[in-house]
Structures are given as structure tokens and as C-alpha cells.
Image (cartoon, rainbow, N blue to C red):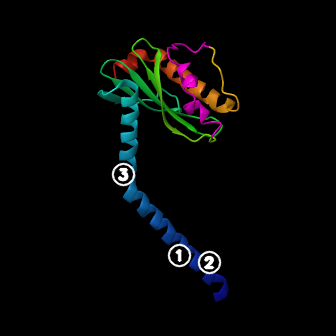
Amino acid sequence: MKDKVKPSLVLTVICVIASLLLVLAYEVTKESIASQQADKFSSSVEALFGECEYTLLDSNFGRDEIDSIAVTEDSNVAFKLTVDGYSKDGIEVLIGIDENGAVCGIEFVSLGETPGLGTKVRDNASFAEQFIGVSDTGYAFDTITGATYSSNGMKHAVDTAIEVYTENKEAILNG
């Protein structure tokens, strides 16, 4: 009987110790990770609109793709979205909307798409430029050959930002 219980007991002790170490590692690093994410967000907003003050909104307006929304003093809005491309949640992007409701910039926060294929949505400048000036979802766009899922993911991100801005403009701009 002892021979049957001892391996289970040893495995249980190892699992408990490993779990405690994971919890400890999480607690030690969570503030640093949150600070780095906030700095990355700030630098992305700055890349879109230049140096500016902004306010973060608490709502995602019922859209799971929206991670956060920042509104600048001069009524520009940055939507941070995470959408699927070829990879699940592979595209994390900031979509800038100007005071007229048109896309004024796109900044990639992270891209987990296939290197050399899906990453073309970031590396091919003309691809992102086709979204600049778009103010409704009824536009035509060109996909990148070999990166169709990633291209459609980018379109979904832009469409989501435009839709949420259009439907909730007053609530967004009034904080």
C-alpha cells in the first residue's frame, strides 16, 4: 500500500511547489509587465498623434476586440484592438480616428502572424496606407497575396474602430 501512495504524494508535493513558484513569479512581475504595456501603449499613441495628453475610456462598447480607447485633447481617438489574422489574436493594432471620423493612422503594437507572410500587413507600407482616410465600412481594399487571413484581420480591425466610433461618437468624445 505504501508503494502505491508514495508516488502520488511526491507528485502532489511537486505540483504544489511548482504552483506556488508560478504564483510568486506572477506577483513579482505583474506590475513591471503592466508598466511596460502602458509605456508601449503611450508610445503607440504618440506615434499616431504626436506628443499629446489623452484620456482612457473604461468602456469597450460591447466589442471584445477593443482592448482600450484613448481620446486626445483635440478629439482624436485611438482604438487598441486585438483581432484574429491567421493566428488567433495575432494582430494587436492601434487605429487612429480623427475628429472627422476618418482613419488617420495605424500603429502595430504586436504582430503574431507568420513571419514573411502575415507580417506583410505591417511591413508593406502601401497596405496600411489604403485605410487612411476611410470613414465608413463600405470601402474596397486590396489583400496581400499569401496573407489573406492577416489582410482580412486588418480590415476587421479598421471596420470595428470605424463602427464603434460612428455609433458612439458622442459618448467617446464626452468621456
State the image coordinates of residue 7 (x, y, percent, origin top left): 62, 81
- The C terminus, quarter of image: top left
User: Marks 3 and 1: in contact by CB < 8 Å?
Assistant: no
**Which amino acid type is marked by label 2?**
Ser
Q: CA distance from mark 2 to mark 1?
A: 9 Å
Residue 1 visible somewhere in the drawing = no
Label 1 vs label 3, nearer the camera: 3
- The N terminus, quarter of image: bottom right
Outermost residue to the right: 146
Q: Residue at x 68, y 29 (%)?
A: 148
Q: For numbered disc 2, what is the local secondary structure?
A: helix
Q: Earlier in the sequence, mark 1 or mark 3?
A: 1
Q: For numbered disc 3, what is the local secondary structure?
A: helix
Q: Residue at x 44, y 61 (%)?
A: 23
User: Left of 97 or right of it: where is 119?
Assistant: right
**Which amino acid type is marked by label 3?**
Ser
State the image coordinates of residue 19 (x, y, percent, origin top left): 50, 66
Q: Which mark is residue 13?
A: 1
State the image coordinates of residue 133 (x, y, percent, origin top left): 49, 14
Q: Which residue is mark 3?
A: 32
Q: Nearer the viewer, residue 112 or 127?
A: 127
